[in-house]
Image (cartoon, grey):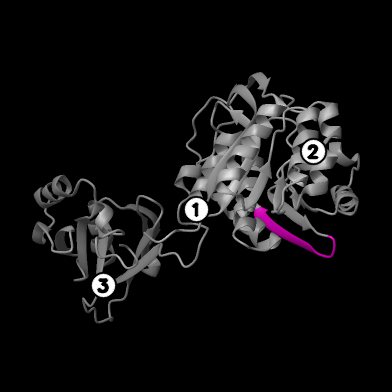
């Protein structure tokens, strides 16, 4: 089998037993963006959406051993540092990373306080952050962290001080600011890039900083520019906030696992549109198949549906369009036989029921009310990895 390249991201951070932030958020982010996450855990915490109940720092020598072990075997394309655990760990990690034969992009998220308000870095540890910022490609503090690092009331003035003092870029994050608008600014030595967005109203934002920093690290590992990496990371965070599952009694986790097709590599096939003549009939048909309708615009003759995994499918009504069934839409169903039987009993007419095809797919064929060909099918690994796949021995 042809060797695949994958961005290798080393994450040096603390573990969040609640799965919302820290190493857990980092791994989910890197994985969903197509990277391979390696870890050096600096602290074990007992926490949930309501707060941090306990913190146990990992000995510095064990942190270094984790770093050495994964780099020696897998190599590394980018490094993300979050909760560092102690001042001593910060210093020895900086020394070890500075001694690497090959410098790689380093994203430093100076974690000081948990979302719940628990302190995760004492004054000595914050004072030791300077050595890590000296190595960083970009530092990603929130507004309270930026103020604590610089003592400046003006965040831009504070960021410029870090840029000149440590020769690193700084992302000024506006999430802690007030108001409906959220502004982020990337400050580099010779450039500034800003983004504006509308605040997403959710209490389930635990781990946004960790997630953003890890997503930036993936972009940099792929060779993207700083601005491109930040832009991709912002999209990922916003989608994860919108997909938050709403669990926990306090500041709950985001929905990393549902951000699949919204950002990352290009091109991505995540939207298909078919033409129809009868809006109500088309909408009723696809809803009956099991698609979730997310846009309902009968006046414009347009409906959009979401499928499991995030891909969208839409119908556009044009009574004068001559519809020719020259292509087919395929919806994969793990419960193919049962679903076809249920739909048939509910009045959906199939041109043929589930059949095993020579190309190893199991298919049932039908048409929507406009005559567009639709297949419900089950393929498993044969969809992407048939025995005759190009480049496969």
Residue in view at x 79 percent, y 48 percent? 135
Residue depicted at x 63% and y 62%: 223
User: Start and end of the magenta stretch?
Assistant: 189-197
In this rendering, the label closer to the viewer, 2 or 1: 1
Q: Quadrant of residue 69?
A: top right
Which residue is labeled 2 in the image? Answer: 145
- Local SS, label 3: loop
Q: Earlier in the sequence, mark 2 or mark 1?
A: 1
Residue at figure coordinates x 23%, y 52% from the top left:
288
Q: SS for tag 1?
A: loop
Q: Which residue is mark 3?
A: 277
**Circle 1 residue:** 34
Of residues 283 and 307, which is closer to you in this image?
307
**Is residue 195 located in the magenta-colored stretch of the structure?**
yes
- Label of residue 257 in the image: none
Measured as percent of width and height from the top left, residue 138 is found at: 75, 51
């Amino acid at each position: 089998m042809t060797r695949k390249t994958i961005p290798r991201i080393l994450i040096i951070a603390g573990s969040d037993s609640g799965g919302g932030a820290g190493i857990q958020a980092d791994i989910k982010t890197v994985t969903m963006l197509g990277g391979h996450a390696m870890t050096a855990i600096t602290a074990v915490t007992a926490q949930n959406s309501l707060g941090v109940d306990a913190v146990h720092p990992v000995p510095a020598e064990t942190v270094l051993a984790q770093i050495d072990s994964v780099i020696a075997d897998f190599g590394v394309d980018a490094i993300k540092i979050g909760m560092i655990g102690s001042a001593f760990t910060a210093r020895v990690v900086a020394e070890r990373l500075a001694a690497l034969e090959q410098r790689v992009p380093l994203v430093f998220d100076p974690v000081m306080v948990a979302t719940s308000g628990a302190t995760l870095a004492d004054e000595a540890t914050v004072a030791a952050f300077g050595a890590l910022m000296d190595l960083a490609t970009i530092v990603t503090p929130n507004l309270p962290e930026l103020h604590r690092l610089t003592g400046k009331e003006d965040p831009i003035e504070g960021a410029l001080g870090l840029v000149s003092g440590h020769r690193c870029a700084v992302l000024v994050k506006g999430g802690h600011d007030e108001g409906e608008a959220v502004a982020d600014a990337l400050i580099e030595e010779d450039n500034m890039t800003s983004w504006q967005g509308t605040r997403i109203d959710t209490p389930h934002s635990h781990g946004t900083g960790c997630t953003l920093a890890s997503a930036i690290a993936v972009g940099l590992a792929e060779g993207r520019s700083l601005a491109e990496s930040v832009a991709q990371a912002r999209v990922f965070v916003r989608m994860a906030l919108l997909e938050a599952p709403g669990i926990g009694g306090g500041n709950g986790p985001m929905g990393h696992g549902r951000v699949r097709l919204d950002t990352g590599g290009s091109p991505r096939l995540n939207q298909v549109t078919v033409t129809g003549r009868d809006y109500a009939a088309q909408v009723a048909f696809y809803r009956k198949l099991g698609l979730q309708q997310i846009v309902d615009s009968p006046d414009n003759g347009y409906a959009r549906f979401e499928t499991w995994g995030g891909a969208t499918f839409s119908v556009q009504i044009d009574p004068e369009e001559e519809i020719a069934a020259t292509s087919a839409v395929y919806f994969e169903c793990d419960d193919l036989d049962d679903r076809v039987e249920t739909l048939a009993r509910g009045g959906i007419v199939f041109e043929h029921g589930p059949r095993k095809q020579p190309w190893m797919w199991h298919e049932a064929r039908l048409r929507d009310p406009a005559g567009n060909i639709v297949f419900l099918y089950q393929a498993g690994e044969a969809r992407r990895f048939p025995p005759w796949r190009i480049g496969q021995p």
